[in-house]
Image (cartoon, rainbow, N blue to C red):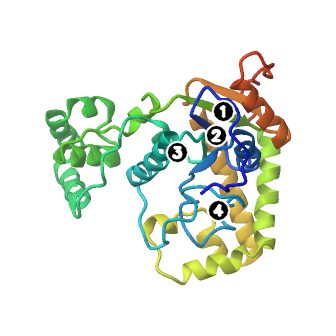
Amino acid sequence: MASSSLPPPEPSGRPVVALAGPTASGKTAVAGVLRGRLGAEVVSADSAALYAGLPVLTAAPGYPARLVGTVPLDEEVSVGAYQRLAHEAIDELVAAGRPVLVVGGTGLYLRAALAGRRLPPPPAAGERERWQTAYDDLGPDAAHALLGERDPGAAARVHPNDRRRVVRALELAAAGHTLAQDRLWSAGNRHETRVVVLDVPLTELDRRIAARVRAMADAGVVDEAKRAWAGTLSATARKVLGLAEFATLPLAEAVEAVTAATRRLARYQRKWLRRLDDVVTLDGRLAPEEIADAVVALERPGERVPRPRRRATDA
């Protein structure tokens, strides 16, 4: 919940501002400034940050934010479940006239939070296994033909050899739904939204990632990870980047492994950012205050807005 000491909201033409960018691009710091400038509450769109007990590992913000540290480590988290939580939080704030700042490092979670299209619920117990067995027994072509009978639209978008997506489409069709996840990227937003992407060249991003991982080590991430690892963990919690490494490897090896994995993640994130439409790209190397000034200026007619930079193309 937002602090009552926050200033009144700045004039804004949109109820929602979304701040996106790869890990270590500076989103958390910018959001910390921007929430004060806009009088906004932050809603996180980060799959790892949802989990409680991992503030160091997930780089949880030092200010209040919704959907941060709210899910026990023994609970599974799906995109659909997150979407329902995010929509509830955003709708509550919009209805109260409070600006919303959605901050995301997980691309699918960001789109799920913003999009009007609802994702279907997770499959009933045993359904995933049933359709996996059916796919294996029938073979790719016959399983795809079955999907074509039950959901022609999904079959047109999924290759027969894509076992995971054919199985998912079949289980959705059996439950009366359709494969909607891909359409999140083209679905309209539920509320009028300004999407701002922070762009940082890879060389600088790599430097920041290395510094962040070293800072985690200095801040006690090993003890945090070992405590979590010793408890009951859901399958999705076990996938939190760095948890297994810091819990089980010698520190030097863990730092090296997590740095490399985070750099790979950042490259993947830069690719999905290109799928976002109608965005303003700002230079993530600027100071957080400067970026916040630029975002606020976007919402004020007549003020000079810095020309958005092109996305970095260095490899």
What amino acid type should be assigned to the residue bearing mark 1? Val
Q: Which residue is mark 3?
A: 93
Between the residue at mark 3 and the residue at mark 4, the CA separation in whole angstroms equals: 25 Å
- N-terminal of the pair, mark 2 or mark 1, is 2
Of callouts 4 and 2, which one flags the residue occurring earlier in the amino acid sequence? 2
Disc 1 or 4, which lies upstream in sequence? 4
Q: Amino acid at mark 2?
A: Ala
The C terminus, quarter of image = top right
- Circles 2 and 1: CB distance less than 8 Å? yes
Relative to 160, does residue 188 appear above or below in the rendering? above
- Whether residue 25 can be seen here: no
Of residues 164 and 75, the one nearer the viewer is: 75
Looking at the image, which residue is at 45% across and 35% down? 115
- Left/right placement of residue 35 relative to residue 124 reads right
Cα distance, mark 4 to mark 2?
16 Å
CA gap, disc 3 to disc 2?
20 Å
**Mark 1 sits on what residue?**
196
- Of residues 207 and 105, the one nearer the viewer is 105
Q: Which residue is mark 4?
A: 58
Which is more N-terminal, label 4 or label 3?
4
Residue 208 spot, x, y in % from top left:
80, 51
Q: Nearer the viewer, mark 3 or mark 2?
A: 3
Of helix, strand and loop, which one carries label 2? strand
- Which marked residue is nearer to the observer: mark 1 or mark 4? 1
Q: What's under tag 4, amino acid-wise?
A: Thr
Residue 2 in view: yes
